[in-house]
Amino acid sequence: MTHTTVGWHVELEFQEDDEHTRAVALVRLPDSSEVRAHGHATRHHTDSNQPRVGEEIAGARALNELAMQLLTKAHGEIDAESGRISHPIHV
């Protein structure tokens, strides 16, 4: 049995102002494709300014969207290879 070690590097970038944090998540896959997703967070005007919290929320939302896109991509590849419609992949 052959074992192959593969690594994925996920990049997260943030843009922030006083009330909004936007995140972009990017993963480059071994097949040279890229999957990119976005997330955002908005600070309520009565909350204290905690940029790290905004990054955590926006980053988590971007990673969640990235996960869903990867599941959809895998689902499509399963269908293409098998020639049939497969069951949904659940998180």
Image (spheres, helix red, strand yellow):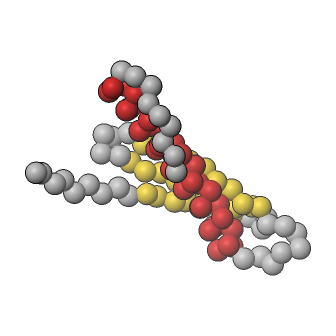
The residue sitting at the front extreme is 87
Could you tell me if residue 24 is visible in this image?
A: no
The answer to whether residue 64 is above or below residue 31 is below
Residue sticking out furthest to the top: 83
Q: What's the residue at 72%, 76% (across, down)?
A: 50
In the rendered image, the residue lying farthest to the right is 46
Residue at x 37%, y 32% (from the top left corner):
78
Answer with left or right where residue 35 lies relative to residue 47.
left
Mark yes or no: residue 19 visible.
Answer: yes
- Residue 11: horizontal and vertical position, in percent? 46, 58
Residue lying furthest left: 1
Vertical side of 31 occupied by 47: above or below: below
Give coordinates of residue 67: x percent, y percent.
50, 50
The residue that appears at 55% across and 59% down in the rendered structure is 13
**Residue drawn 26% across and 55% down?**
6
Query: Residue 56: where, in percent of width, then height?
Result: 62, 68
Tell me: residue 53, above or below residue 86.
below
State how many labels appear: 0
Up the image or down, 55 lies above or below 34; here it is below
44 displayed left or right of 88: right
Question: Residue 16 location, x and y as percent?
Answer: 69, 63
From the viewer's perspective, tell me whether residue 48 is left or right of residue 55: right
